[in-house]
Image (cartoon, grey):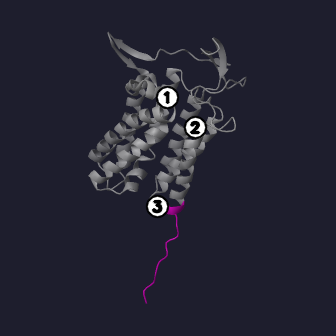
C-alpha cells in the first residue's frame, strides 16, 4: 500500500515567475529526444545535426499547440467555448496525446516539404523517439496529480486525496502505467526494431499500432474525464475511441510496408 507524495507542481518560483514541473518535463523530453535523434542520424544518410534540430523544433510546436487544442476540442469543448483563454493555460495540464499527434503529423508534412523528404522518411525517423517524450509527459501528469485511475482496493492502488469525496481514496496510478507502457516499453520495442533497415512506413505503423493497443488497455484502469464520462456502454472512453483509428491505420501501414513486390523478368 503506497501513498501519493503530494509533490509541489511548482519547481521554482522567482517572484511572480513560476516554473512548473509539468513544463520542465516537456523540456527534458525534447532534450532527450534531440539527443536520440542525433544518435539515429549517425546511421541515416539523409539526416544530419541541422535536420534533426529543425525537425525537433517543428515537432515541439506541433506537440504543444496540437495537444492543447486537441484537449480543448476532444475533452472540454464547452469549457473552451465558455472560457477560450484557457487555451494558453498549459501549465495547468490538459494536453491530449491525440491532438498532439495530429499537430506532429502536420509539422512533419511541413518539415518534409521544406527539407525535400518523403513523409515516411520523416515519420519512420521520429517514431522511435516519440515514446521518450510520452514518458516524461506522463511523469509530468503524475507530479501534477492528474489523470488518476479508477478507485480500487488492489495492492497496485495509490492513496490520494480526492476532492470529490473530500477524503483519501485508493486509485490506480495510471500516469505511471502509461509512462511504462507508452513510454519505456514502446520506446524499447521501436528502438530495437528500427536498428535494422525496415520497409518504408513499417516503423511508423508499428508505433501507431502499439500505442493504440497500449492506450486502449490503460483506459480500462483510468477514470474517464469528469466532463465526459463514459461514451458508450458504461465503459468506452474518448481515449479508446480516438485510439482505435491508430490501431487500424498502424496495421494498414505495416501491411503496406511488407506487401509482396512482384518482380517482372524481362525476356
Contact between labelled residues 1 and 2, with CB atoms less than 8 Å apart: no
Tell me where the magenta segment starts and ends, as one range: 255-267
Q: Residue at x 68, y 23 (%)?
A: 151
Q: Is residue 134 visible?
A: yes
Q: Residues within 10 Å of mark 3 (few under 14, many from 20)?
A: some
- At a point 55% along the width and 42% down the height, the residue shown is 242
Tell me the element at label 3. Answer: loop
The residue at 67%/23% (across/down) is 157
Q: Tag 1 or tag 2, which sits nearer the N-term?
A: 1
Q: Nearer the viewer, residue 194 or 65?
A: 65
In the image, which is nearer the foreground, mark 2 or mark 3? 2
Residue tagged by mark 3?
199
Is residue 163 rendered to the left or right of residue 38? right
Relative image position of residue 62 (x, y in whole percent): 37, 39
Of residues 149 and 135, which is closer to you in this image? 149
In the rendered structure, find residue 238 and report the number of the disc placed on it: 2
Residue at x 31%, y 39% (from the top left corner): 57
Which is more foreground, mark 1 or mark 3? 1
Indicate the position of residue 89 as horizontal and vertical percent values.
40, 24
In the picture, the quarter occupied by the N terminus is top right
Residue nearer the viewer, 163 or 52: 163
Residue 153 coordinates in the image, percent (x, y)? 73, 23
Occupied quadrant, residue 129: top left
Distance Cα–Cα, label 1 vs label 3: 43 Å
Mark 1 crowd level (few <14, some 14–19, many ≥20, 10 Å Cα): few
Q: Secondary structure at mark 2?
A: helix
| Label of residue 78 in the image | 1
- Determine the residue located farthest toward the bottom in the rendered image: 267
Q: How many marks?
A: 3
Neighbours of disc 2 within 10 Å: few (<14), some (14-19), many (20+): some
Q: Quadrant of residue 37?
A: top left
Amino acid at each position: 500500500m503506497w501513498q501519493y507524495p503530494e509533490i509541489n507542481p511548482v519547481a521554482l518560483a522567482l517572484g511572480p515567475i513560476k516554473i512548473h514541473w509539468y513544463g520542465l518535463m516537456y523540456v527534458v523530453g525534447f532534450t532527450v529526444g534531440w539527443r536520440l535523434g542525433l544518435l539515429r542520424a549517425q546511421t541515416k544518410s539523409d539526416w544530419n545535426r541541422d535536420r534533426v534540430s529543425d525537425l525537433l523544433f517543428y515537432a515541439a510546436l506541433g506537440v504543444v499547440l496540437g495537444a492543447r487544442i486537441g484537449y480543448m476540442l476532444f475533452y472540454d469543448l464547452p469549457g473552451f467555448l465558455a472560457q477560450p483563454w484557457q487555451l494558453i493555460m498549459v501549465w495547468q495540464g490538459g494536453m491530449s496525446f491525440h491532438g498532439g499527434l495530429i499537430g506532429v503529423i502536420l509539422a512533419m508534412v511541413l518539415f518534409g516539404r521544406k527539407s525535400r523528404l518523403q513523409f515516411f522518411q520523416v515519420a519512420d525517423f521520429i517514431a522511435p523517439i516519440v515514446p521518450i517524450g510520452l514518458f516524461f509527459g506522463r511523469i509530468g501528469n503524475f507530479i501534477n496529480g492528474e489523470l488518476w485511475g479508477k478507485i480500487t482496493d488492489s495492492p497496485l492502488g495509490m492513496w490520494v486525496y480526492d476532492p470529490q469525496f473530500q477524503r483519501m481514496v485508493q486509485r490506480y496510478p495510471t500516469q505511471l502505467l502509461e509512462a511504462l507502457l507508452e513510454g519505456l516499453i514502446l520506446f524499447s520495442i521501436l528502438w530495437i526494431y528500427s536498428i535494422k533497415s525496415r520497409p518504408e512506413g513499417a516503423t511508423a505503423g508499428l508505433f501507431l499500432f502499439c500505442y493504440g493497443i497500449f492506450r486502449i488497455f490503460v483506459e480500462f484502469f483510468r477514470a474517464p474525464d469528469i466532463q465526459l464520462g463514459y461514451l458508450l456502454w458504461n465503459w468506452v472512453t474518448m481515449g479508446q475511441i480516438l485510439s482505435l483509428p491508430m490501431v487500424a491505420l498502424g496495421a494498414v501501414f505495416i501491411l503496406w510496408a511488407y506487401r509482396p513486390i512482384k518482380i517482372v523478368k524481362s525476356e
